[in-house]
Image (cartoon, rainbow, N blue to C red):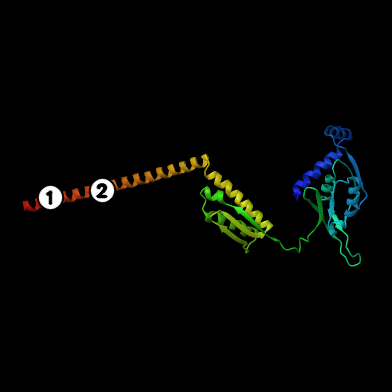
Amino acid sequence: MLSCTTKALLTSSMLFALSAPTLAQDSSDEAAGQVIVPFTFDGGTASHLVDELETTFPDFPVVLDEKASRVILPKFKARVTDAGTIVELITQMPGMITPANQQNGIVKKGKLDFQVVGRELVYITFDEERDIRSARPVSQVAVLSVQELLTSGMEVEEIMSTIEAGIELQMPGKQPTIRFHPTTGIIFIKSDKATLDVVSMTIESLKKSAAWRISDEALAARAAVLKLKQIETLEELQDLTSEQQMKNLKESQQRLEERQNRASQRNDDSER
């Protein structure tokens, strides 16, 4: 199944092509050997749209699930070279699904989605819009590698404590399920998508930190810091040595004065 980003890009490209001058578009398509087919949909259910699509493009097989067949789509006009463009377009349109039971049913909002089956068949489904206020976050399992970080010299405690700090900010007071496999450097984590995104971003940031640690600039900076510490240590030793020398000199001077005083005292005693 195509991602939302891919679908948006494809649809934007299609809309740009539809808004371009007709002559320029015709010239481009003729050069590519493609035929532009006008397609008009007057609005209605996705089931009606697929009927018209299969009439216009009989070699393009489409299957709708039961919910998708009841989605109401707005009317539109297009000039395309491939039926897949129409499928891309309708998946970007907000739609409402009509109730199966018109008396007791509830109209639901959402969007169509599709997947290619066996490269020959397009299967269209309906993704119901969730009520953000009442919906509970859906737990998912992410499998993330930190082997690169371990190889760079980072300790497991550094990595895990950083990840846990990010999780604590994202969901205070709650801890997701985390398992670490030390042999392979793989982390398994089960939580909601927002938390998993935080963990992924944290690991990517740690990789940048790890890359900086082993860069030439970082090594030079660490060498400079180490040299500065060595100089400071040497100066401290020199200061200590100087202080000790001064202390020794003073002690020697005191001992000399004491000997002189005792000698002088003995002379005085002998004269008496």
Secondary structure at numbered mark 1: helix
Q: Earlier in the sequence, mark 2 or mark 1?
A: 2
**Along the viewing direction, whichever of 25 and 155 lies nearer the viewer:** 25
Secondary structure at numbered mark 2: helix
Q: Residue at x 55, y 44 (%)?
A: 212
Residue type beneath disc 1? Ala
Asked if 190 appears above or below 79 in the picture, the reply is below
Crowd around label 2: few <14 · some 14–19 · many ≥20 (10 Å): few
Image coords of residue 46 (percent x, y): 88, 54
Q: Is residue 94 left or right of residue 174?
A: right
Residue type beneath disc 2? Asn
Q: Is residue 137 left or right of residue 221?
A: right
**Along the viewing direction, whichever of 231 and 174 lies nearer the viewer:** 174
Image coords of residue 180 (percent x, y): 57, 58
Crowd around label 1: few <14 · some 14–19 · many ≥20 (10 Å): few
Image coords of residue 238 (percent x, y): 34, 44
